Structure formats: structure tokens, C-alpha cells
Amino acid sequence: MTTLFTIPITSTGGTIVCTNPTAKHGAETKENIYLLTFTSPKDNRLTPTFIDAFILALDIIEHRYPKGVVVTTSGIPKFYSNGLDLELVMITEGFLEKWLWRLFRKLLTYPMPTICLLNGHAFAGGFMLAMYHDYRIQNPNKGFLCVNELEFGVPLQTPMMSIFREKLTPTTFRNVVLEAHRFGGHESLKAGIVDAVGGLEEVVSLVRDRKLLNKAETGIYGTMKEEMYARVLDGLDDHKGNLVWREKVEVRNAALREEGLKRVAIWEKSPISKL
């Protein structure tokens, strides 16, 4: 495995290391597989410095290396990513629009095939990050995929929700969002969340079996994905519009709740309620 470059994650002392897993030191290879391994203690949270390093790594591959396939994984055995640091999000102005949505858009429209190798847990934002890749392979023996915002009362914003709606069946989408279900590797495969179970060997096999190495050569791979995922991109690109829509919905819901409470109060005072 040949190391191509390393990007520091300054806030945690971590790194993103780019390697070619099919190349031996000093040997040429025609298989342009770029493995990005991020190690940002303790659980690869999606912070501004992590995202800046991630996007830079993707830019370097796109603009300085031959077209191929990009694979992402974690150097931390327990976690692929544990999602957002909510306290940091609250004090970082414009975090969603300036960082998270930008990363999601970069991956969704990336001009090469992208594969997420889920070595461990991917919770909340980490699960979303995995879904913004083209393909997913999950460790069959450890680690769960879960959107657990329901359990601590944080509603999903439009770009967080839309990627699941776009890529999952309605039943799996419901189980992910409304049950906060934890999917192990084999269950994820059965539900259609991942394309295979395994590790790096299975990633290389998927690349070869599906002939992904030459898919980006014509230069329209990213354009095709923009057309495929136009609805998701609308949500990523209209952050202010999403907030305005959400506010209108909340005002309407408040009015509907008030009407409902009035109906209940009237019923409670009526003879019918005593029956």
C-alpha cells in the first residue's frame, strides 16, 4: 500500500491519509483507487477542521491525480464517524451551510465513483455522510448504522432527511427515521442500505466487478449525479429557503395544536365526555 499524501486535522492532532491499496511500494499500478483514511480522535466528529481537511483531500485527488475511485474509511476501529459535535455546531456561525452542506454536496456530485467503507459505528451525521457516497460496504461483525436524533429531540433538516428518502425504500426510510433502528452489517445489506459486507478486499472486488475504475474517464460522471440527485441538491443549495419553510410549518402546526386543544376542552365540558 503506497502513501500518496497526508492532510492534518489540526483541532484533534488527527490526519487524513491517502493511499493506493492495490499498489506496492516502488511499483506502478493502473488501478487508481484512492483510499482516504481519516483518524480524528476520539470518534471522527464532523467539525469544521475535519470537513476542511476532507474537502481538501478530495480536491487534491480530483485536480492532481488521474481519474479513478475514491474510498473513505476510518483509522479508528470503533467508529467510522459519530456525527456532529452539537455543542460546537451551536457556537459555529453558519456551520451547516458553510461546512456540512458543502461536504455533502462535494461527495454527492464528485466526478469519480465514491465508496464508503464502514469499519465501525456511523451514527447520525456519520450515517448521513455514508449515504452521500455512491456505494457502501459495511463491516459484517461490528458497528451499527443509526440516525438517533429522534432519541434526543433534534429534528432533521432537509438535506439530512432527503438523502435517505432518495436512496432507501419507504419501509427502510421509515425504520431509519421514525424508529432510530440500529442496522448491523447483514441487516443493512438486506435492507439495501449497503452494497456488500466486508472490508478492503471486498471494496477492491466491488471496484473490479462493477468496472468502476474507468467510469469517470468521459468527464461527465459528476454531471450525471447532479441530474440524478437534483432534488437533494435543491435542499443543499437553498439553506435559507429551507429555514423559511420550516418556520412556516411550525407556525401552522402551532395554530393546529391550538385548534385541537380547543376542541378537546369543549369535549371535556360536554356530557358526552362522561359516557
Image (tube, helix red, strand yellow):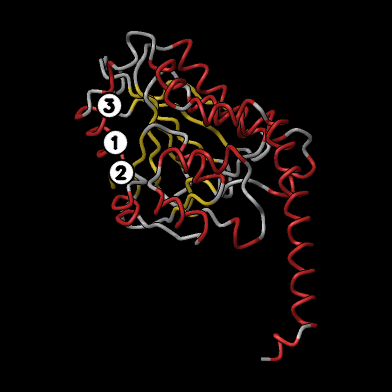
Please tell me whether residue 157 is drawn above or below residue 145 in the rendered image: above
The one nearer the camera, 185 or 23, is 185
Q: Residue at x 61, y 34 (%)?
A: 50
Q: Amino acid at mark 2?
A: Gly
Residue at the extreme left of the image, as rendered: 209
Q: Amino acid at mark 3?
A: Thr
Q: Amino acid at mark 1?
A: Val
Please tell me whether residue 95 is drawn above or below residue 88 in the rendered image: above
Q: Is residue 247 left or right of residue 129?
A: right
Cα–Cα gap, marks 2 and 3: 14 Å
Q: Residue at x 55, y 31 (%)?
A: 104
Q: Is residue 240 left or right of residue 173?
A: right
In which quadrant is the C terminus drawn?
bottom right
Give the residue number, with chain letter if any, for mark 1: 203
Q: Give SS at disc 2.
A: loop
In which quadrant is the N terminus drawn?
top left
Query: Residue 272 got which mark?
Result: none
Q: Position of residue 114 (x, y in %)?
A: 39, 28
Q: Give SS at disc 1.
A: helix
Q: Position of residue 192 (x, y in %)?
A: 32, 46
Give the residue number, with chain letter if any, for mark 3: 22
Give the residue number, with chain letter if any, for mark 2: 199
Residue at the extreme bottom of the image, as rendered: 275
Q: Residues within 10 Å of mark 2 (few under 14, many from 20)?
A: some
Quadrant for residue 248, please give it.
top right
